[in-house]
Amino acid sequence: MNITPWLFRNLRKHRGLFRPVRRLLSRSATLDYWYRSYVEKLRYKDVVEVHDLPPIFHYWAGKYLLPKFRDFGFCEPESFFVKHLQEVALNAHKEEVRFASIGSGNCDAEIRIALSLRHLGVDRFTIHCIDLNPAMLKRGKALAEQNGLDKHIFTEKADFNHWRPQHDYDAVIANQSLHHVVNLEGLFDAVKEALTPAGLFLISDMIGRNGHQRWPEALALVEAFWSELPQSHRRNRLTGEQEDVFINRDCSAEGFEGIRSQDILPLLIERFSFDFFLGFSNVIFPFIDRCFGPNFDENNEWDRAFIDRVQERDEDEILSGRIKPTQMLAVVNKREQGKEIYFKNMNPAFCVRAPDFVPTSLTSA
């Protein structure tokens, strides 16, 4: 009998009962890290669809993200990885290229990427999938064998907070994994050391406030739009709770979710040069994510109009610099200069939200 789903549901549902234990463990850095690691592994042990998102997200992404992506030669994050890995392979002038994926989970994205590369005629490559969770890596290895990719996909159990690369890599992928990392400095230094001179670090990740909270200037807008929602749209589908008032929840309170997300971009700027950077979305995300997105019907006229209006305001505020994007795609290298391809005026430095920033008042939707 597998008690993991029951245990995790009750850990989340009755978190107040665990707070005394949590406070005791947090007094020791070692015990705090052990507790967070345990919760992280527990959370994802039986999760097969890690990146599963509701239909309203795909409505939004298709209407607003896809045109931006196409301008840069790809149509979604996985094809972003495929595009750049193919370029690395073609330009490497070597018999075989070696890639690594940090925080690969079930390796499902890496397997789709590998199949796409083979379809494009790139066959001499390996992808080393690195993750903390042995259950997910086991599923990934089995899935790779089912797809005939056992010569391309290799798994490695490692905590990337302490990862020391055993090989050099022509490219390293981080697909929605960096926001789980405590020791970003150590990981970025390890990646930089592992990259070949022409190697690339390819990233799709979340760069908003720690714990995926909203900074005050964005929170004011979320709350204003929240007040327009019917009651049926305020039910948190993950917790089952009715949230009549938007809760600016700190998701890093348990585990590593968003533990240092606000530090990702500044640390990348310090250590790497940018070939490409695309920052996007902030206020829109609470309405299209796994928690509340399922409450919206992409076929309902009011729901679509509401999402369109939130997106329009979100985009205007981000382009003005009054709020900052919480998502990014980036290609960085360890050379002194990058190609510096950006969307409009939104270079990496423009998209950093300093913790001591004093916002202007943004209260109306």
Image (cartoon, rainbow, N blue to C red):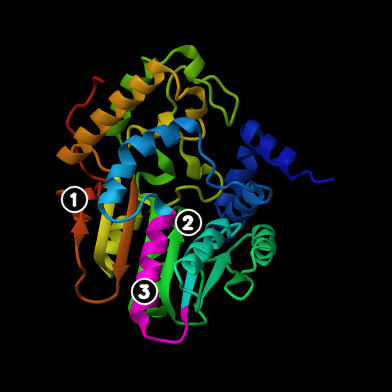
The residue at the far right in this view is 1
Q: Residue at x 20, y 50 (%)?
A: 343
Amino acid type, residue under disc 2 in the picture: Ser
- Above or below residue 105? Residue 69 is above
Amino acid type, residue under disc 1 in the picture: Phe
Of residues 9 and 203, the one drawn nearer to the viewer in this rendering? 203
Q: Secondary structure at mark 3?
A: helix
Q: Is residue 16 left or right of residue 217?
A: right
Of residues 312 and 266, the one drawn nearer to the viewer in this rendering? 312
Q: Residue at x 31, y 37 (%)?
A: 64
Whole-percent x, y for residue 198 in the image? 31, 79
Amino acid type, residue under disc 3 in the picture: Val
Badge 1 or badge 3: first in the primary sequence: 3
Which residues lie in the magenta part? 78-97
Q: Is residue 66 left or right of residue 298?
A: left
**Majority secondary structure of the magenta segment?**
helix
Of residues 136 and 132, the one drawn nearer to the viewer in this rendering? 136
Q: Which residue is mark 1?
A: 350
In magenta stretch: residue 94:
yes
Q: Secondary structure at mark 2?
A: loop
Whole-percent x, y for residue 125 in the image? 50, 76
Badge 1 or badge 2: first in the primary sequence: 2
Whole-percent x, y for residue 218 in the image? 29, 32
User: Where is the N terminus found, in terms of image quarters?
Assistant: top right
CA–CA distance in space, label 1 to label 3: 28 Å
The disc placed on residue 88 is: 3
| Nearest-to-viewer mark from 1 and 3 | 3
Q: Which residue is mark 2?
A: 177
- Residue 299 sits in quarter: top left
Crowd rating for badge 1 (residues with CA inside 10 Å; few <14, some 14–19, many 20+): some
